[in-house]
Amino acid sequence: MHKEHRQRLRYSFLKDGLEGSHAYEIVELLLSLGTHRIDCK
């Protein structure tokens, strides 16, 4: 369930970069890198 969300988040960040991402999306992406099984949303 969360795996697809994290993939979409990662893809969106790679496509749009920092300028195209909201601050909460960047924080969520960074938190998801360190926590593999916990929902960071």
Image (cartoon, rainbow, N blue to C red):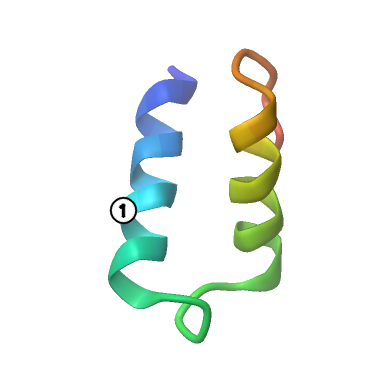
- 30 left or right of 17? right
Residue in front for this viewpoint, 33 or 23: 33
Q: Quadrant of residue 5?
A: top left
Where is residue 18 drawn, in percent x and y?
A: 52, 78
Q: Is residue 30 left or right of residue 18?
A: right
Q: x, y percentage for residue 17? A: 42, 75
How many numbered tags mark residues here? 1
| Residue 2 sits above or below residue 12 on the image | above
Asked if residue 23 lies left or right of residue 36, the reply is: right
Residue 6 horizontal/vertical position (percent)? 45, 36
Q: Quadrant of the N terminus?
A: top left
The kind of residue on which mark 1 rests is: Tyr
Q: Is residue 19 above or below residue 17?
A: below
Picture residue at 62% right of the left edge, 61% below the top: 26
Please tell me whether residue 21 is drawn above or below residue 30 in the rendered image. Answer: below
**Label 1 element class:** helix
Query: Label 1 crowding class (10 Å Cα cut-off): few <14, some 14-19, many 20+?
Result: few
As drawn, which residue projects farthest toward the bottom? 19
Give the position of the C terminus as an image quadrant: top right
Please give the name of the residue rendered at 65% of the width and 48% of the height, measured from the top-left corner: 30
**Quadrant housing residue 24:** bottom right
Hey, which residue is sitting farthest top in the picture?
37
Q: State the image coordinates of residue 34 (x, y, percent, origin top left).
A: 68, 30
Q: Is residue 5 left or right of 30 when viewed as pictured?
A: left
Residue that numbered label 1 is attached to: 11
Q: Residue at x 60, y 73 (%)?
A: 22
Classify 2 as above or below 27.
Answer: above
Residue at the location (69% across, 18% down)? Answer: 38
